Amino acid sequence: MLNRPLTAGAAVQIALLNNRGLQAAYNELGISEAHYVQASLPPSPRFGFNQLAGDLKVEITRQLVGNVLALATLPARSEIARELLRAAQLRAAEATLVLAAETRKQFYRAVAANEQVSLVTQTDGVAGDTEHTEARMKLRIECERLARHMGL
């Protein structure tokens, strides 16, 4: 991808792949999904066997114990986890869109600064050294900002 001329779309792709904050948002999304799945499952039952020994009698009791409260609150916990998952999905989508928009905007600023340097260079006789230096400095700043957005 880096061997070809940089386009706005390629800059956005590179930024989306390299951004640590975006990776964290998607990791949070995965954790929220795991919490949702866990909250949607009924509690695991526990089995117990007891052996009571007395005067020539052996009594074996069996138990099946389940968390009745967890079973009763299963629909509510599942709904809460679903809402938290939806919120994490929206946060990840927002982070993706904001990063893409900012990177695209910064790409066009860098292109504009490059064009400004080209124009100043073409009008070499008219433009002074100060204008040349200012245009090149602006280009360098915009390219640095773009590189930062792209995570390079």
Image (cartoon, helix red, strand yellow):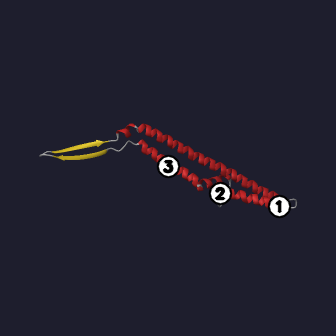
Label 1 sits on what residue type? Thr
Q: What residue is disc 1 on? A: 130
78 or 3: which is nearer to us? Answer: 78
Q: Are marks 2 and 3 in contact (CB under 8 Å)?
A: no
Looking at the image, is mark 1 or mark 3 earlier in the sequence? 3
138 relative to 19 in the view: left or right? right
Label 2, secondary structure: give it: helix
Q: CA distance from mark 1 to mark 2?
A: 27 Å
Circle 3 is placed at which residue position?
A: 30
Q: Position of residue 15 (x, y in %)?
A: 62, 54
Q: Is residue 138 visible?
A: yes
Mark 3 neighbour density, 10 Å: few (under 14) some (14–19) many (20 or more): some
Q: Residues within 10 Å of mark 1 (few under 14, many from 20)?
A: few
Q: Compared with residue 71, is residue 95 higher up or lower down, i.e. above or below?
A: below
Q: Which residue is mark 2?
A: 148
Residue shown at 19% from the left, 46% from the top: 52
Q: Locate residue 27, reporting x and y percent.
A: 52, 51
Q: Is residue 71 above or below residue 122?
A: above
* Left or right, residue 134 beside residue 9: right
Q: Could you tell me which quadrant the C terminus lies in?
A: bottom right
**Residue under the image location 68 percent in, 56 percent down:** 146
